[in-house]
Image: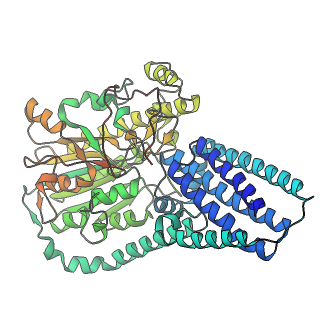
Amino acid sequence: MKSLIYRLAIGLTGLVFFRALDMLSGNELAKSGVLMTASMLGLAGILIIKRPRRTWISRISLAIYLLFFVDAAIKGFLRDYFGMRPNPALVLQAALNTSGGETQEFFLHNWQAMGQALLVFFIVSCCAIAAERRLSKAQRSTPILPTGRSAHITVAVMSTLFIALHFNPTMTKENPVLMWPIRYLDYQEQLAAAAALQKNQATQMTERHNWQVKYDGAPDNTVVWVIGESTNRANLSLYGYARATTPALDAMRSDLLVFKDVLSSEAATMNSLMNMLTPANLDQPHVWSEQPNIVMLAQEAGYKTFWISNHSPNDGWLGLVANQAGNSTFINKGVGRGENNIDGNLLPHVGAALADRAPKKLIIVHLLGAHPSYNMRYPTLFSQFNAVDDAVSASMKQAGRSIWIRHKRNQYDNAILYGDHVLASLIEMTRKASVGRPAALLFSADHGQEVGHTRNHAGHSSADNSGYEIPMLIWDSAPKQSEAQKSALENRPYQTDHLDHTLLGLLDISTKYYAATRDVLSSQFLPSARKINGLHYLPEVGPAPGAVQAITPKMIY
């Protein structure tokens, strides 16, 4: 039994090493440590008691080490990628809906972080294997003694503990053997729910009289909703960023409502859009499959609907919604987000939709925006921030950001600069197409992006505020408000899980799914508590937009 205890010490030391490198949280270390202890002294103990051979002891111990070390390395990589331990269902959803092109792009963008996780796994595993061999060599000269009563009791207790732990769902999901299969079953349930939703669309339409939809606006009305991608407002000069990343929007600032304090509800596209497009919100995340979305409500109110996208047409639930539109256009005919279509290629299709003679139109434009890989999101002409030496680069150097992250920030800012050109073009096209008629354009990003603001990371982040703090703006053909009215609107705190209410307000649609208190433009608007990762949002105070922090904050686990 002592040999197992020695080997358990080797395995636990390896887990502590992963924790020291912040690849495991303290909570994960504790759970993995308990499971490793119970499996090593319990399950492995049973096998060794029955067949007390040193080769069995060594092989079983190595198998348990490597299993937990692989799990720790994966968690470490995902923590770096997402900024925290992500929801494994979200990881599976991303992985299983990823095409070959997107996989290649993912490796190109994340090879460094993946390499680091692999290197740590290799070093820890080699050390554990070396320690195991040394221990085995030292024990060769000692005979294998019959296991005594105390050993049998220990094995029985630990085996019972191992089984009992799995009555706790949290511990069950921490088991590296069971975690991903369980999450895969959860993912399959999501797919089944989406398939059921598709089958039930006809049923929902037969019940549309229960939606209580009424159009209250002028005979003509055009609403354009531009969905940005991976856009952090701290990187827009429109919000005070030190680099001139939004010169076109800056020039038309007086014609825009620029909301200064808006959060996305999620740090990833699909869940965020579920909340924006449907009555689902952070308090009721599941009603997306039970209640009508914006496209369905707009069509019921008499709008001609358009969905114009630079994303893949086969995008799970979002693809179902997009294809509900009367006219859907997907210009990205490749195999993923890594393809060569830039957002400017959407402009002719939006122009055609604006020119359509339908009196009421809802045009949804889904951009690729600044989604990683950033250098694929803009033409060479917009490579304005490559290798620049300015206040932003100096601030990042002072904060200890790596040259790799500084390079990614430059590429990201180039993508924002090109996005400024595209969005300003869409606003100008909408303005020209609607002279003398009501029209509005709403721009909101699905989520933000961490690009060296708080740590050495470039990509999605569920732990940093930068993963949620997004730009939102509105151009409207209606008469301008006074400066006081405009300022009051722009300073309203908002979270985009309520954006469907603002859209319904712009569309002049009344329905039982509309609440004026959640419409940021309504005189009845009431601010509500905002959350990220289930925790109350605390905005950063002090640094200028786009500034970086010299001290990496403690991540949220």
Instruction: Tell me if I can see residue 8 in this picture.
Output: yes
Quadrant showing the N terminus: bottom right
- In the image, farthest residue toward the right: 141
Q: Nearer the viewer, residue 38 or 409?
A: 38
Residue 27 x/y as whole percent: 50, 52
Q: Position of residue 150 (x, y in %)?
A: 71, 69
**Residue at 45% from the left image edge and 42% from the top image edge:** 555
Give the number of marks. 0
Q: Residue at 46% of width from left, 70% of height from top?
A: 186
Q: Residue furthest front?
A: 149
**What residue is drawn where x is 57% and y is 44%?**
109
Residue under the point 11% across and 54% down: 516
User: What is the quadrant of residue 248 in the picture?
Assistant: top left
* Of residues 170 and 117, the one drawn nearer to the viewer in this rendering: 170
Q: Answer left or right for 472 relative to 134.
A: left
* Vertical arrangement, residue 319 with respect to residue 193, above or below: above
Q: Quadrant of residue 468?
A: top left
**Visual colour scheme:** rainbow
Give the vertical position of 497 relative to 83 (above or below): below
Q: Which is nearer the eye, 122 or 488?
A: 122
Residue 394, x across and y down, in percent: 48, 19
Q: Position of residue 5 (x, y in %)?
A: 72, 58
Can see residue 340? no
Horizontally, residue 43 falls left or right of residue 337, namely right
